[in-house]
Image: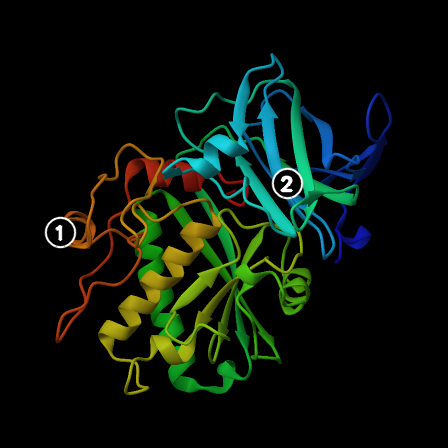
Amino acid sequence: MRWISVASIACGLLIVGCGPKFEETTIDGLRVVTADLKSKGNGQAKFKLPVNEGETSFLATVEVESPYHTHFQYLDAPGGENLFDWEEETLGDHSKTNAGYIAETVNLNWPVLDSDPALAEGKYKIAFNVVEGREFVASPIRLSVALKADDDLTSGVLNVAIVYAGGTDEDEGVVAAVESALDHWIELYAEIGVDLAFTTATYEDGDLDPPAFGTDDAFVEIAEMTGFREVSVVIAPDINALDDVFGIAGDIPGPLVATRRSGILVSASQSAGTDGEFDAVDVRVLGETLAHETGHYLGLFHPVEVTFDTWDALSDTPECDGEFNCVEAMEDFLMFPFPVCGLVACTPQDVVTDEQGAVVNRHVAIE
């Protein structure tokens, strides 16, 4: 496991007071707070996050080493109001963030919805639990929180690193398809006020596990070679263990710090279709895949999951039930869980709702 590199820090200050010591830095325009914590024997650790006047959202990432797993237990506002509770989130049928589920790396974005209370100056109390199997344990914990101050949460710029892995940069068909797909992605995100800025890079190894598994160190290396506030989208020949998947994001939301879940992985072979050649429909679907998976990384869930009994927490996405009803209601939604294809074509998925746009624009990656 690797933490923020000292070389990437613009300025730093060690804060000492009641509670754990923490370091405060500025990286790519974000105030970043980091702390080394340790859970008690009951598995719990707490941290008081100082929020400054004018800051509008934060992304917190907590990490532990295998064989331990962690999750965010709760978040309380400076006045004591409970804002997030892991049981409410994980036991309900509406998804807002994956922060309540256990993993070696877990992320909490806040606020998520327009209906969530705006950030206020003061100290927010964050609590975590650490487990080994079914037992609560004492364990070192690394916390990293990026905070942004943004006076316009309706528009911004997202920086994206397109990383060609495993020699995909040498496949002219793949590169041409990706470049055309980026134009479509730009059009999709323009609907929610987000401009895209791209850089490109290469990574030698293309034999990659899904970042959502949190098992592949390649995503640490890729995140370290791209910008801190830049989302890494990796184009690989295939996705290990998920042969029929177009793309997969590291988490909802994904981290900015370099972890094994830091990135999005897209399959070139799956995107090219059964004939292995990119036609116009394949390119459009690839653009939608890039936009869809990055939407997850920025905090968006499917409006309905493929079990058709769990929904996102947004009020402007229909709450349907059953595959037929859900396809009829939302087959053209960008965040629908799968492409809807007939014998000769797939339905364009280009609808992004106002509330989905608000979630994306609030994410700290959006400048």
Whether residue 182 is situated above or below residue 114 in the rendered picture: below
Q: Position of residue 128 (x, y in %)?
A: 67, 35
Q: Which residue carries the number 2 mark?
A: 29
Which numbered disc covers residue 60? none
Residue 155 visible at all? no
How many marks can you see? 2
- State which quadrant residue 361 falls in: top left
**CA neighbours of label 2 inside 10 A, class few (<14), some (14 to 19), many (20+):** some
Residue at 62% x, 18% y is 121
Left or right, 108 with reference to 287: right
Q: Amino acid at mark 1?
A: Glu
Residue 345, image x, y percentages: 15, 71
The residue that mark 1 highlights is 328
Q: Position of residue 295 (x, y in %)?
A: 41, 51
* Quadrant in which residue 274 is drawn: bottom left
Which mark is in front, 2 or 1?
A: 1
Q: CA gap, disc 2 to disc 1?
A: 43 Å
Residue at 30% from the left image edge and 37% from the top image edge: 354
What is the crowding at mark 1: few (fewer than 14 residues within 10 Å), some, or many (at least 20)?
few
Label located before the other in sequence (2 or 1): 2
Residue 42: quarter of image:
top right
Where disc 2 sits, the SS reads loop
- Is residue 69 positioned above or below 210 on the image? above
* Residue toward you, 343 or 183: 343
Residue type (three-letter) at the residue carrying disc 2:
Gly
| Residue found at x 45% / y 69% | 266
Q: Secondary structure at mark 1?
A: helix
Q: Position of residue 62 (x, y in %)?
A: 67, 44
Q: Is residue 312 left or right of residue 130?
A: left
* Residue 49 or residue 214, whichever sits in front: 214
